[in-house]
DNA sequence: TCCATAGTTCGACAAATATCGAACCGTTGT
DNA sequence: ACAACGGTTCGATATTTGTCGAACTATGGA
């Protein structure tokens, strides 16, 4: 009876292992499937935009990304990454215990020419 | 006592005339006060982006803007315009009984070089 | 003078997003 | 082995944003 307690809230073994993968491959959308409005929305949040700026000079391990915001709860940060990832803006791949995050720059440039450049080039936030 | 009924819901004369101007000047933000994220957010909605595209070839009277969406309630449309206006993307000025809507292209280009071009140039939505 | 028109604001409600602790897992160092 | 670490997912809650009818107004024309 307490076997239910062994697994997370109201979830069987199958669903459990299907929905709780840590440090595993995360789904990335095909760039052909992302809409311009998705990208614009992902970039429209200051915290997310800051992450993108941090990544503009190269890939980073996730820990160094929001270095500007050291008190940011990790679940929140993870969520920001998720929005960016699902919008096709960043790639997030497991690297041992950590995760390497990078901009999907080439793909974005090919699909939305000049967009990332103008956003990153803007002096004001 | 029924003088209260003469004016809209629970509002005195002063507030009434302060908050209910139709076909009057609407406030436009100084371009120096708009953040990049505000612009990106305004453009991140398909309906709003469509309006911006409609305006890319020149000012339009409001009625011709969302011509793609003829069933759109006017209050909704007005709201879309408000978001774009408050983000500094469009100008909305009274023109007799109607309103002339236009892109604040020069100002935006000067402040966020290349942004509008890349967004309008994108083939995909 | 009166009416139809274009468009804003309000107000209430619906839907999408954000926030963050708790639970959890694989990796790595000890 | 095992505990600390980095990071995701869940679930609940708070906040923002979207939707749209109703009320309202100035304008322009009949």
Image (cartoon, coloured by chain):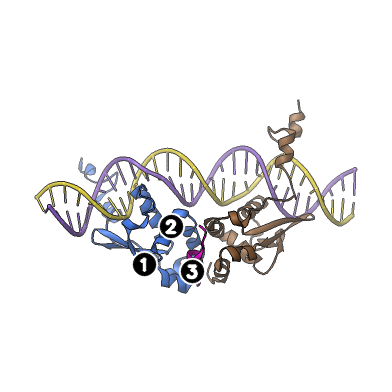
Chain colours: A brown, B blue, C yellow, D purple
Q: Which residues are magenta?
A: B113-125
Identify the secondary structure beneath mark 1.
loop
Q: Residue A91 location, x and y as percent?
A: 67, 58
- Disc 2/disc 1 C-alpha distance (Å): 14 Å
Point out which mark residue B58 bears.
1
Residue A17's label in the rendered image is: none
Q: Earlier in the sequence, mark 3 or mark 2?
A: 2
Tell which subunit mark 2 falls on.
B
Instruction: Answer yes or no: are tags 2 and 1 on the same subunit.
Output: yes
From where the camera sits, is residue A4 visible? yes
Q: Identify which residue, A57 or A35, lies in the foreground.
A: A35
Residue on which disc 2 sits: B50
Identify the residue at horizontal 23%, vertical 42% (top origin).
Answer: B5
Asked if residue A50 lies in the magenta stretch, the reply is no
Asked if disc 3 and disc 2 are in contact, CB closer than 8 Å, the reply is no
Chain letter belonging to callout 3: B
Of mark 1 and mark 3, the one earlier in the sequence is: 1
Which quarter of the picture shows residue B9?
top left
| Quadrant where the image shows the N terminus of chain B | top left
The numbered mark, 2 or 1, whose residue comes first in the sequence reads 2
Left or right: residue C5 compared with residue A28: left
Q: Which residue is mark 3?
A: B117
Name the chain letter of the residue that bears numbered label 1.
B
Residue B86 seen in render: no
**Would you say A91 lies left or right of B99 here?**
right
Q: Position of residue B34 (x, y in %)?
A: 46, 65
Name above or below for residue A81 compared with residue B113: above
Between the C-alphas of marks 1 and 3, the distance is 14 Å
Element class at badge 3: helix
**Are the residues flagged by discs 2 and 1 in contact, CB closer than 8 Å?**
no
How far separated are the C-alphas under marks 3 and 2? 14 Å
């Amino acid at each position: 009876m307490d076997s239910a307690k062994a697994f997370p809230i109201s979830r069987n073994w199958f669903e459990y292992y299907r929905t709780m993968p840590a440090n595993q491959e995360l789904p990335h959308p095909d760039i052909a499937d992302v809409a311009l409005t998705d990208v614009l929305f992902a970039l429209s949040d200051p915290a997310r935009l800051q992450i993108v700026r941090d990544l503009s000079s190269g890939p980073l391990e996730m820990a160094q990304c929001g270095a500007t915001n050291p008190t940011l709860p990790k679940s929140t940060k993870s969520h920001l990454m998720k929005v960016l990832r699902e919008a096709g803006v960043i790639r997030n791949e497991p690297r041992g215990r950590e995760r390497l995050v990078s901009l999907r720059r080439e793909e974005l440039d090919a699909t939305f020419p000049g967009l990332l450049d103008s956003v990153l080039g803007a002096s004001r936030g």
